[in-house]
Image (spheres, rainbow, N blue to C red):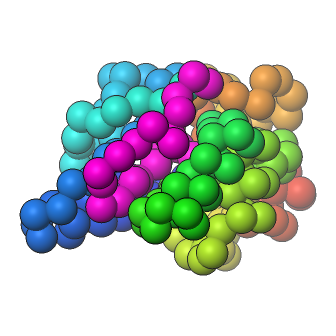
Amino acid sequence: MNAGKSTAMLQVAHNYEEQGQTVRLFTAAIDDRFGVGKITSRLGLQRDVETFDAGTDFLAIDKVACVLVDEAQFLSVAQVRQLHQLAQVRGVPVICYGLRTDFRGEPFPGSIYLLALADDIEELKNICTCGKKATMNIRVDENGKRIREGAQIAIGGNERYRQACGRCFYSGEH
């Protein structure tokens, strides 16, 4: 969160397209923070893209130079396998951007398989309020008070989530 995932993804798409290549960009249909089907960077960049949901079949993708997926933690295990097959069998680069864990420190099912099957993993870093590297996310209520229970998926941005290092996550200093 707040590590520049969307900005990095939009830059990769730009680089491919500047070379005249076709790129397919996807984001989760459930993410409507900035409008459905929009990838929006906190730096102000925004782009309309395709959405994925439980019914999306990534193996139906054809004639493309690269597939980019934002909010990849919301992929199903089957979809992660489809993307892996697209990359391994058809040779299409697939680049996914997302979170490893939720606000409780529990992994997202899609993220588990993305981490297990990825040929390469590049961590985009962020900083905790204490100055250490942030690796966790904390959900907060409208008053900024930490929430420790609830559904794994609740869409929100800076108003609902804070990034934290492991020490602050477990000590409850946020």
Q: Indicate the quadrant where residue 140 lies.
A: top right
x, y percentage for residue 59?
A: 51, 42
Residue 30 in view, yes or no: yes
**Image point 22% across, 66% down: which residue?**
16
On screen, 20 above or below 103? Answer: below
**Image point 71% across, 64% down: which residue?**
117
Residue most toward the front? 89
Instruction: Give 79 or 59, whichever is nearer the viewer.
Output: 59
Instruction: Give 97 or 54, whichever is nearer the viewer.
Output: 54
Instruction: Give 5 or 119, whichever is nearer the viewer.
Output: 119
**Image point 21% across, 54% down: which residue?**
22
On screen, 149 above or below 139? Answer: above
x, y percentage for residue 40?
A: 32, 42
Query: Is 161 left, or right, of 101 in this rendering?
Result: left
The mark total stands at 0
On screen, 124 above or below 46? Answer: below
Query: Is 78 left, or right, of 41 in this rendering?
Result: right
**Image point 23% across, 42% down: which residue?**
46
Query: Is 23 left, or right, of 81 in this rendering?
Result: left
Residue 95 in view, yes or no: no
Is 66 included in the stretch rendered in magenta? yes
x, y percentage for residue 29?
A: 47, 25
On screen, 147 above or below 172? Answer: above
x, y percentage for residue 27?
A: 44, 38
Query: Is 142 left, or right, of 9 in this rendering?
Result: right
Q: Indicate the quadrant where residue 163 lies.
A: bottom right
Q: Which residues are magenta?
A: 54-72
